[in-house]
Amino acid sequence: MAEHLGDRLGRLRRLADQTQEGLAERSGVSVDVIRKLEQRRKHSARLPTLHSLARGLGVELTALLGDPPGVPSNGEADPPQLVAVRRAIMPPLFAPLAEPTGADALTLPLVKAAIAEGWTLYHRAEFGPLMDALPGVLADARFLAAVGTADQRAAGQAALGKALQLGGHLAIRLGKTDLALSALERAMAAAEQSSDPLLAPMVSNSVAWNYQRQNRLPDAERLAVHAADSLGREGVTTTEAMRVWGGLVMSAATSVARSGDYETAGSMMHTAEDAAGRLGGLPSATDGRMVSVFSRSSVRIERVRLAVQHARPDEALTLARGMRLSPDTPVSWRTWLLLDVARAHTDLGNAEGAVQALQSLLRAAPGWMRHHTLAVSIVSDLWAGSVHPPGLRTLAEFLGVTT
């Protein structure tokens, strides 16, 4: 069973040599909330509250959130799969480039197809298969980035940057934010030598997300705004550019919201929603898996998320009601929507509605449900309540919150 948030909070507070009152003063979170969490009378907290607590403790947000249930950390060495990914992201220094097996048959289209499939695995939360495949994909892309004509090398660098960005996202999901930054630094270096003008702003968005996980909200906001402004000056005239620009605006809005300014974040999200509406007049992206996730659906999903995080469950359910998801909405984003709907129902005391949303999630994406700490906190709150609708026990047993 995953460590309870209150236990983790108490342990980190004692490591920081702080009293509950001292942490309250440093974080701006009430002593009552801290006490209820540590006494397990409260099983979860909203993200802005968690960011404030992490800031008061002087730790990354990930330290307070805990490890995803699917990849628990027990103090032992990294599993072989993750070691292989780490070595592929950070190959031996000053060593000659190893020629991959079958290099003669290696082509850019094949490598790009493998990278796109890797993103599909990522969005499905199939992290085991992705960790198996990623080292080979990185080796192939790194080889293509070093051979051929200048144009061929630039195209290879674009593939390498996208593969390294994927490695960064995987590392963030596994709670390895330092490894993620190493991957994303290398992705940015590849982007600067690549033939893809959108790769650098896409990598910037990934770095901003990593900064959010590290509780570096001002850094995340500044980076996303700077990248969006730079892209805007170049001109946002294609579907791909609009998706990247819109994703950066959403990222900046999320950082602003988590810093406590919901109104400004809401205005930024409306700007993103207007941009998403203009996508309908542009041709479809060649391969949507290789550019930022951005559409009417993703903007609405993010607005639902921000409303839930700021104790506006009625607003969240109104935004979610009747939503038609675009066909290219990844499973990972659908997962967030169902989790937030469940959280909103829980906040309104509608345990039956919350269980129905969670059952839909279990049917659609059991891998993501097992991975998300938010799913555990919601089910823990429901299990601690006096009303246990049909299906709740199955969910609690699946996530291990009954023991």
Image (spheres, helix red, strand yellow):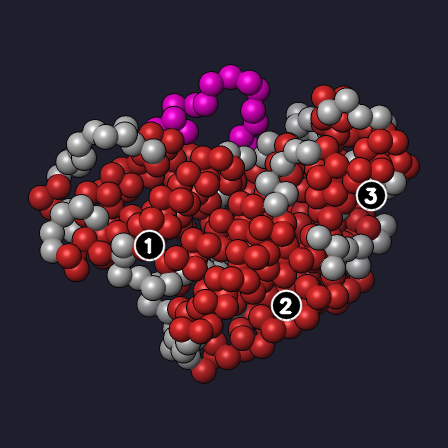
Question: Residue at label 2?
Answer: 269
Question: Residue at label 1?
Answer: 191
Judging depth in this view, the residue of 347 and 272 nearest the camera is 272
Q: Residue at x 84, y 53 (%)?
A: 348
Going by the numbered disc 3, the residue's amino acid type is: Gly
Q: Residue at x 66, y 28 (%)?
A: 2
Residue 113 lies in the magenta-colored region: no
Look at the image and tell me in which quarter the N terminus lies.
Answer: top right
Q: Residue 62: give x, y in percent of width and height.
A: 61, 36
Question: Residue at label 3?
Answer: 28
Of the numbered discs 2 and 3, the one sitting upstream in the chain is: 3
- Which element type, helix, strand or loop, lies under badge 2? helix
Q: Is residue 296 left or right of residue 32?
A: left
Q: Residue at x 24, y 46 (%)?
A: 141
Q: Residue 229: give x, y in percent of width and height.
A: 50, 68
**Could you classify mark 1 by the number of other residues whose Cα lies within 10 Å: few (under 14), some (14-19), or many (20 or more)?**
many
| Residue 72 vertical position relative to residue 372 in the rendered view, above or below | above
Q: Residue 379: give x, y in percent of width and height.
A: 73, 39
Image disc number at residue 118: none
Q: Nearer the viewer, mark 1 or mark 2?
A: 1
Residue 77 lies in the magenta-colored region: yes
Judging depth in this view, the residue of 241 and 334 nearest the camera is 241
Q: Which residues are magenta?
A: 70-84
Going by the numbered disc 2, the residue's amino acid type is: Met
Q: Is residue 96 left or right of residue 3?
A: left
Q: Residue furthest bottom?
A: 281
Of the numbered discs 1 and 2, the one sitting upstream in the chain is: 1
Look at the image and tell me in which quarter the C terminus lies.
Answer: top right
- The residues bearing labels 1 and 2 have C-alpha atoms spaced at a distance of 27 Å
- CB contact under 8 Å: marks 1 and 2: no
- The residues bearing labels 1 and 3 have C-alpha atoms spaced at a distance of 40 Å
Going by the numbered disc 1, the residue's amino acid type is: Ala
